[in-house]
Image (spheres, rainbow, N blue to C red):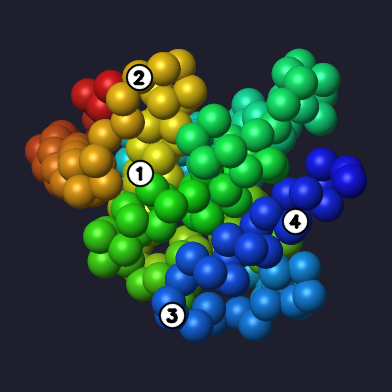
Amino acid sequence: MTLGFKRALHCQKCLSTCFDEKPACPPSTSGFSSAPAALPPGWSFIWSRRIPNKVKVFGWKACRNALPTLENLACRRATITNVCATCQLPGEDLAHILLTFSFSRQVWAISNLPMSIISCWSLDAEHWFRQVCHGLSSSQGDLFLLMSWMLWKNRNKRLMGGMGKLALKVVNEVICQLQGYTKCIASLAPQQCPKIEHLS
Ligand SMILES: [Zn+2]
């Protein structure tokens, strides 16, 4: 069984059981939508946001499939396993880390972002980010990107043997940090370039 097939199987199982709500996009036989809607081109949906630059870079790397997920590392033969260290399922890719992983589902559920939009993974990470950001309001989109970044950070912490945070704590931290960042940006003069990076 190829890694790609395992991943598709893994995600299909997850997506079919993870969400109570009916996804906005009808799933194809692979578990993903086969006919994604056309979305605005360009990267302003990331770069124009009022979020820390490191979160923007994370979002862009995620869209370019440039993050070192175990699936990517296994494909590049940098590691011998693509099995998620937490739930022992094969195919630890961004769909799993950010969406189908049980902890991520908890975080999204608590976040109050519309699950019908969040849960609709089609094609790949780039399309997911574009689709979700397009479907959310500006402030919801900021929250979504920050939440995704925090999920990635939390995953890295667990992978290194650390204790992951509780879902509620993750959500509260993200909301708090976003509010703090927005407040700081608003207090700056318009001509000042925001360089606030108080998120660790
Ligand atoms: Zn997992």
Please, what secondary structure does the residue beneath circle 1 have?
A: helix
Q: Are marks 1 and 3 in contact (CB under 8 Å)?
A: no
Please, what secondary structure does the residue beneath circle 4 have?
A: helix
Q: Earlier in the sequence, mark 2 or mark 4?
A: 4
Quarter of the C terminus within the rendering: top left
Q: Earlier in the sequence, mark 1 or mark 3?
A: 3
Q: Residue 193 placed where, x, y %?
A: 30, 29
- Residue under label 3, please give it: 21
Can see residue 91?
yes
The residues bearing labels 2 and 1 have C-alpha atoms spaced at a distance of: 21 Å
Residue located 53% across and 78% down the image: 23
Residue 19 falls left or right of residue 91? left
Q: Residue 22 placed where, x, y %?
A: 50, 83
- Residue under label 4, please give it: 8
Residue located 75% across and 56% down the image: 8
Residue 58 falls left or right of residue 80? left
The residues bearing labels 4 and 1 have C-alpha atoms spaced at a distance of: 26 Å
Please, what secondary structure does the residue beneath circle 3 have?
A: loop
Picture layout, residue 45 above or below residue 177: below
- Residue under label 2, please give it: 162
